[in-house]
Image (spheres, rainbow, N blue to C red):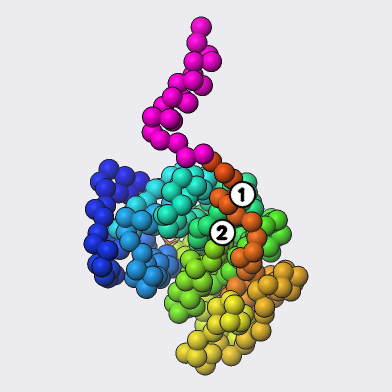
């Protein structure tokens, strides 16, 4: 857990934050790991939005990408495998004033944490949930994950992954009450930043799948798309992530897609013959759990009294 023992001092209201105000420990990911790019984008986002470090929390589970909170100079919680989302939900429900970001790997989110991913999406609590998808368990040295392509060899399935890969975007779009579903790639920093910014500004649970290179264990998986921008379709819409001019010249294929059109979003996500980046779906009109759940305000003394009354029921 980062910054669990030392409190971040509140700052002056007029203090301006710079990149080094958000930079934590030196990142220890492998050279060339896509996680570095996501870290930079997240820190840039905090600068752009001028988020106070003491009002910002990064929560992670277990995996390479889950070291993220250590590298941020904000509050952080490096928790248990697959359990980042319930921790983040608890934080947000009790401290709705905090900016909550969740960082998960593919195994963390759509395997052991799959139940939490489904229900956090449905609960639609306001936070940004990033799934850094390198298609493998990297920390445990190349084990097949749910998003490993069929036939891809790993240490756990040396003959090649038996099953077709899970499609996280298509699956998330199938969850009732999903309110923001986007996909970006860490090797396109301008798009990554714009997507994270749109996710942060969304009022609700924003699920962002980040295609992430792991040069150690899955170096070849995204290589063709990195080298050949024509393999990528940019989803373009003013309500999604408008494609900046600088990227239009590099990525010639754009699709006009209205993020309110869920049926079209599902069709686009299901077609895996192309890599599609942008906001698939976004609807701020969907109910959020924190709005529908009404907790009475309790003082600290009230909480102790209620707890004691509960415990007294079991007195013998
Ligand atoms: Fe990144 Fe892969 Fe190294 Fe993990 S093993 S830090 S995902 S490059």
Identify the residue position indicated by label 1 in the image: 292
The answer to whether one can see residue 61 in this image is no
Q: Residue at x 75, y 70 (%)?
A: 263
Q: Secondary structure at mark 1?
A: helix
Q: Residue at x 45, y 79 (%)?
A: 190
> Which residue reaches farthest bottom?
249
- Count of labels shown? 2
What segment is highlighted magenta in the picture? 296-316
Q: Nearer the viewer, residue 221 or 276?
A: 276
The answer to whether one can see residue 291 in this image is yes
User: Which image quadrant for residue 154?
Assistant: bottom right
Residue 199, image x, y percentages: 52, 67
Residue 92, image x, y percentages: 47, 50
Left or right: residue 270 versus residue 279 is: right
Q: Is residue 139 magenta?
A: no
Identify the residue position indicated by label 2 in the image: 205
Q: Residue at x 50, y 10 (%)?
A: 315
């Amino acid at each position: 857990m980062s910054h669990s023992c030392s409190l971040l001092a509140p700052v002056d209201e007029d203090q301006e934050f710079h990149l080094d105000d958000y930079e934590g420990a030196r990142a220890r990911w492998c050279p060339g790991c896509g996680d570095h790019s996501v870290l930079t984008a997240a820190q840039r986002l905090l600068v752009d939005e001028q988020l106070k470090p003491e009002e910002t929390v990064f929560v992670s589970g277990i995996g390479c990408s889950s070291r993220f909170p250590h590298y941020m100079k904000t509050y952080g919680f490096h928790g248990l495998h697959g359990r980042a989302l319930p921790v983040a939900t608890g934080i947000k429900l009790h401290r709705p004033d905090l900016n909550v970001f969740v960082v998960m790997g593919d195994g963390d989110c759509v395997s052991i944490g799959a139940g939490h991913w489904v229900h956090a999406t449905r609960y639609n609590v306001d936070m940004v949930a990033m799934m850094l998808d390198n298609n493998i368990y990297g920390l445990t040295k190349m084990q097949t994950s749910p998003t490993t392509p069929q036939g891809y060899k790993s240490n756990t399935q040396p003959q090649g992954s038996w099953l077709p890969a899970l499609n996280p975007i298509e699956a998330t779009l199938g969850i009732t009450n999903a309110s923001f579903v986007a996909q970006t790639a860490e090797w396109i920093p301008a798009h990554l930043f714009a997507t994270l910014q749109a996710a942060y500004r969304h009022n609700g649970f924003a699920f962002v799948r980040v295609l992430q290179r792991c040069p150690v264990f899955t170096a070849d998986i995204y290589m063709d798309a990195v080298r050949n921008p024509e393999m990528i379709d940019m989803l373009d819409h003013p309500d999604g992530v408008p494609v900046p001019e600088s990227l239009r010249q590099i990525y010639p294929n754009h699709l006009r897609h209205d993020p309110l059109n869920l049926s079209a979003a599902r069709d686009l996500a299901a077609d895996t013959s192309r890599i599609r980046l942008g906001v698939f779906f976004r609807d701020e009109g969907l109910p959020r759990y924190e709005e529908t759940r009404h907790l009475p305000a309790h003082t600290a003394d009230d909480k102790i009294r209620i707890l004691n009354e509960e415990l007294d029921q079991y007195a013998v």
